[in-house]
Amino acid sequence: MTRTHDKDILLVALGGNALIRQGERGTIEEQFANLRGPMRQLALLAQDRRLIITHGNGPQVGNLLLQQESCPDIPQMPLEVLVAQTQGQIGYLIESTLEEELRCLKGRRRHMVSLISYVVVNEHDPAFREPSKPIGPVYSKEQAACLPWPMMLTPKGYRRVVASPQPLTIVEKEEIRRLVALDFIVICCGGGGIPVVREGRSFHGVDAVIDKDLASACLATEIDADTLVIATDVPGVALDYGTPSERFLSILTLADAERHLAEMQFQPGSMAPKVEAAVRFIHKGGGHAIICHLDQIAAAVAGNAGTAIVHG
Ligand code: ADP
Ligand code: MG
């Protein structure tokens, strides 16, 4: 594709930990405070780059589900409506914090928009038969045994899981591309996007949560981003994670990434989709893909932190 932009396009996918850290309840004060550090880095990076921010919603969408399930008098909303709610709520938190950090830099005013985004999935995706996406709070083994939902043991503990189909295309990609070309900072694909299926000329939502890392890679490819950064709560990709021989990698080649994915080195629903997302982006012509800690986004973009996924 012919490059038409003068400044690099940076797409940063923020993990759920950007808002709620492990062990926290997720009060609004905690969420605003946690965003401060990542937003300070993004404000600096945005000085000479075009910027797109995507974000997870696992803890928030799980909490909304719990809230509505505890109040049977009010009609239950399907998951895709809850995803839409989290795009609004998290978009507001990110936008207002980033706006403040940009003002501190006293540069020219940057336009910014949080975009409700839909992502197309295949209604026959096998993921609908096998829930795999962890959402909501972490439970102990004893608590998990008493809960009525499908559960999965993650490195953080037991969590409820929901269906997570593959993202096929971002419905608003043209809108996002144009806004980015106008130098708007765009916050989009929140929670992996509102999952929709196509039926003739219409779309309708489906009960699922798309992985935000895979949706971010899809968007990064579709809008021809230069760099994809996936920011989370570990310094990068590790081999033998959580064991005495654990080692974090500064570089991971495509061939090694694919081999380790096949060997299940990376936990499904957490690190595996991040590596898969980086692999897809680089395979489809992306420039740089890095998985890093939320506190090291700027260092990772400069090549001094995180795991870079590279050809080879
Ligand atoms: P996010 O909200 O950022 O998407 P996730 O919990 O989905 O966060 O993914 C990050 C988690 O992946 C880490 O906290 C870590 O526990 C887990 N993880 C699983 N396997 C690995 C691995 N091989 N290397 C690093 N982290 C891993
Ligand atoms: Mg995740």
Image (cartoon, rainbow, N blue to C red):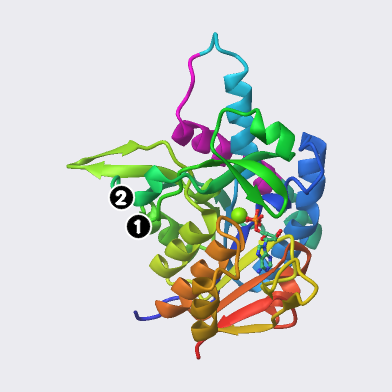
Spot the residue most to the top: 73
Q: Position of residue 135 (x, y in %)?
A: 60, 42
Highlighted magenta segment, given as a residue range: 75-96
Badge 2: how crowded within 10 Å, few (<14), some, or many (20+)?
Answer: some
Q: Which residue is mark 2?
A: 122
Counting other residues with Cα less than 10 Å from the Cα at mark 1, is it few (<14), some (14-19), or many (20 or more)? some
CA–CA distance between discs 1 and 2?
8 Å
Q: Nearer the viewer, residue 196 or 241?
A: 241
SS assignment at label 1: loop
Q: Would you say residue 90 sits in the magenta stretch?
A: yes
Q: Which residue is mark 1?
A: 168
Label 1 close to label 2 by CB (< 8 Å): yes
* Amino acid residing under circle 1: Leu
Q: Residue at x 75, y 70 (%)?
A: 235
Q: Position of residue 259 (x, y in %)?
A: 51, 79
Q: Residue at x 78, y 43 (%)?
A: 32
